């Protein structure tokens, strides 16, 4: 996957633009949610210390052998541009991610623990609950629209209205 950021060092913000050499090979039919929509759930709360099962029980042995599946952390959908781009990025809470576009097979990767920690900090600092749901300006030719979903909150922005609170989030997204 190759993601392009616009004016990463110096202009109004870092925006995930889009060249993914990946595609929605796995389906995504009309009735299925996009990866960004799937990210609306927040990560599972940590288990409370008082509810641990003794180590001698079969339940704890099976729990450690089968860790809980990763849950969506953040989803990003990028649309627009001269080519009619529709790309998605879904980052799971364990740091694995999947990218897809119309032009090729879906691709996966894994963020390092430091990269994942930086993304989590940026997401928390952005305070999605208090951002406008839609922050877009007048459409521009060949412009991109960005839809981010985190902890049940979706924010849509574009090239004309760059929310400063999202700069660190875009900078922390996987960039390979």
Image (spheres, rainbow, N blue to C red):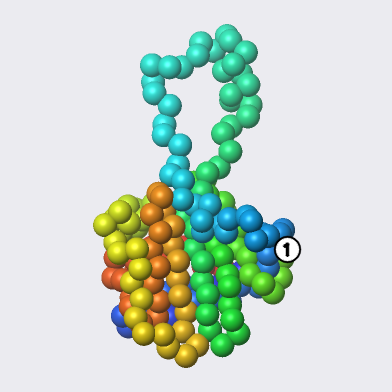
62 in relation to 172, above or below = above
Task: Look at the image and tell me in which quarter the C terminus lies.
Answer: bottom right
**Of all residues shown, which one is farthest toward the front?**
31
Which residue is drawn at the image coordinates 60% and 85% (left, top)?
83
Which residue is drawn at the image coordinates 44% and 57% (left, top)?
149
Residue 162 lies in quadrant = bottom left
**Of all residues shown, which one is farthest toward the bottom?**
141
Residue 115 picture location, percent across and down = 45, 56
145 in relation to 170, above or below = below
Nearer to me, 105 or 120: 105
Side of 86 where 93 appears, left or right: left
Side of 83 where 118 appears, left or right: left
How many numbered tags mark residues here? 1
Which residue is drawn at the image coordinates 58% and 25% (left, top)?
64
Asked if residue 18 can be seen in this view, the reply is: yes
Nearer to me, 105 or 29: 29
Which residue is drawn at the image coordinates 43% and 17% (left, top)?
51
Task: Look at the image and tell me in which quarter the N terminus lies.
Answer: bottom right
151 in relation to 90, above or below = above
SS at badge 1: loop
Dot 1 surroundings within 10 Å: few (below 14), some, or many (20 or more)?
A: some
Residue 47 picture location, percent across and down = 43, 26
Nearer to me, 66 or 150: 150
Side of 115 where 98 appears, left or right: right
Residue 21 picture location, percent across and down = 66, 73
**Of all residues shown, which one is farthest toward the left?**
130
Reading the image, the residue beneath label 1 is 25
Asked if residue 7 can be seen in this view, the reply is: no
């Amino acid at each position: 996957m190759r993601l392009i950021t616009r004016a990463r060092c110096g202009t109004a913000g870092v925006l995930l633009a889009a060249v993914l050499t990946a595609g929605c090979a796995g389906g995504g039919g009309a009735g299925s949610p996009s990866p960004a929509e799937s990210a609306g759930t927040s990560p599972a709360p940590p288990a409370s210390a008082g509810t641990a099962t003794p180590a001698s029980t079969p339940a704890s042995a099976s729990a450690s052998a089968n860790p809980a599946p990763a849950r969506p952390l953040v989803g990003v959908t990028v649309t627009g541009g001269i080519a009619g781009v529709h790309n998605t990025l879904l980052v799971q809470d364990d740091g694995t991610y999947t990218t897809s576009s119309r032009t090729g097979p879906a691709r996966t990767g894994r963020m390092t623990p430091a990269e994942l920690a930086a993304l989590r900090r940026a997401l928390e600092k952005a305070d999605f609950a208090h951002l406008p749901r839609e922050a877009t300006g007048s459409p521009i030719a060949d412009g991109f629209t960005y839809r981010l979903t985190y902890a049940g909150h979706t924010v849509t922005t574009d090239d004309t209205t760059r929310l400063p609170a999202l700069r660190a989030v875009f900078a922390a997204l996987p960039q390979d």
